[in-house]
Amino acid sequence: MTGEKREVGPELMRIILMLQIIGVHYLSHAGLLPQAGVPLAEGQFVGAILESVCIVCLNGWVLLSGYYMTERSFRFRRLLLFLAEVYFYLLLGYGCMLLTGIMPREELGGVYGVVQRLLPISGSAYWFMSAYIIVYILSPVLCMGMDRLTRGQARTMLLCLLFFSVLLKSVVPVRFPTDHDGYEAGWFIVLFLLARYLRKFEIRLPQPGLLLAGCFAGIAAGTLGFHALGLRTGHFLDFMNVFYAYNHVFNVAASMAMFQLFRGLKLPEGRLPELIRRVAPSMLGVYLLHEHPAIRDRWLGWIEGLIGRVPAGQPALLLLHFTVSILMVFVVGLAVDQLRGLAERRVA
């Protein structure tokens, strides 16, 4: 995002993506996702629909980074700031949880557990950050490599990568040993290169809004359809989960369509765009707080203590609970990160 002011469309997209990330975690913690070979429980039909809309979150985030990052974006100082932010939330979270007694010391797991937590990138305290930082370190090479390719070379390379990492797993109903559903640095590299291709050759998708809606519908229909097929036949039990994979063809296409919609979004300058630009840089902090290893499995229980248990059997109330919970997590995370940023600026 170059120029005097950051483009408001991509910044707004970052905020929406973080709300979707929280939503994905809410649905998982609440047990609202269909289970292979098990009849749908209360709320899981609604949960499957909501997951289909939210699951685009991670691909969209990496596409944003890859599109706007250049070979000059990598700075060792910036890498240190990434790590400092991770450590801030890691130590703050463990400190608060231990001092309040919410987390017993035994949960640290002895010497091995402590060392693993003190090395969060290698120890994968946050799997996303472990993968993202690898891609950030490689970004100068990835940018320069893509920039040296002709359009034909770049297209051929991406088609080969997408064939093996996306198309095969999307249509072949078996689990490949090399496929990790996009939870790895290798998939982030593919997304990064795809974003560079979109930028270099100014690729535009036809009817991105229609494509986005179609992909959301395809993810939901595929998941629920193969869930029902698995119950009836006893086959394809695991294939229903493929539609929620980050490297599924519907997910990839949806993230590209969403990115195109927000990249072209223009808002009249005023208070709203300035608020969006102020809030968007805190999105990583919102993630690091609510996905803290000692907090991620607890925050939904805390919310239930405040606004009641997840009303799985009442769709309208479930949607309300889902929305309010996401906003509560978002606001708390935003407030903490704004305070962290204020303290950081004063120290600097």
Image: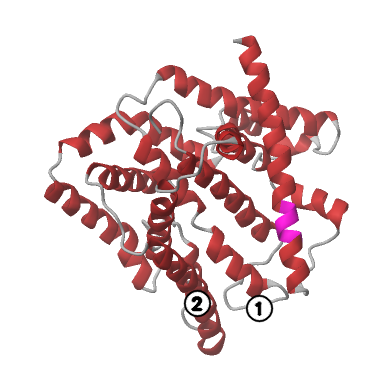
Task: Tell whether position 288 is magenta.
Answer: no
Q: Residue at 12% across / 43% down in the picture?
A: 150
Q: Position of residue 347 (x, y in %)?
A: 64, 10
Looking at the rendered structure, the secondary structure element under dot 1 is loop
Which mark identifies residue 151?
Answer: none
Q: CA distance from mark 1 to mark 2?
A: 14 Å
* Residue 298 appears in view: no
Q: Residue at 80% across / 38% down in the picture?
A: 103
Q: Residue at 16% across / 53% down in the picture?
A: 156
Q: Which residue is mark 1?
A: 40
Comparing 192 with 271, the one in front is 271
Q: Quadrant of the N terminus?
A: top left
- The main secondary structure of the magenta stretch is helix
Q: Position of residue 303 (x, y in %)?
A: 80, 51
* Residue 193 appears in view: yes
Write down the region rendered in magenta.
Answer: 321-325
Amino acid type, callout 1: Leu
Which image quarter: residue 316? bottom right
Q: Position of residue 268 (x, y in %)?
A: 51, 41
Looking at the rendered structure, the secondary structure element under dot 2 is helix
Q: Position of residue 161 (x, y in %)?
A: 26, 54
Which mark identifies residue 221?
Answer: 2
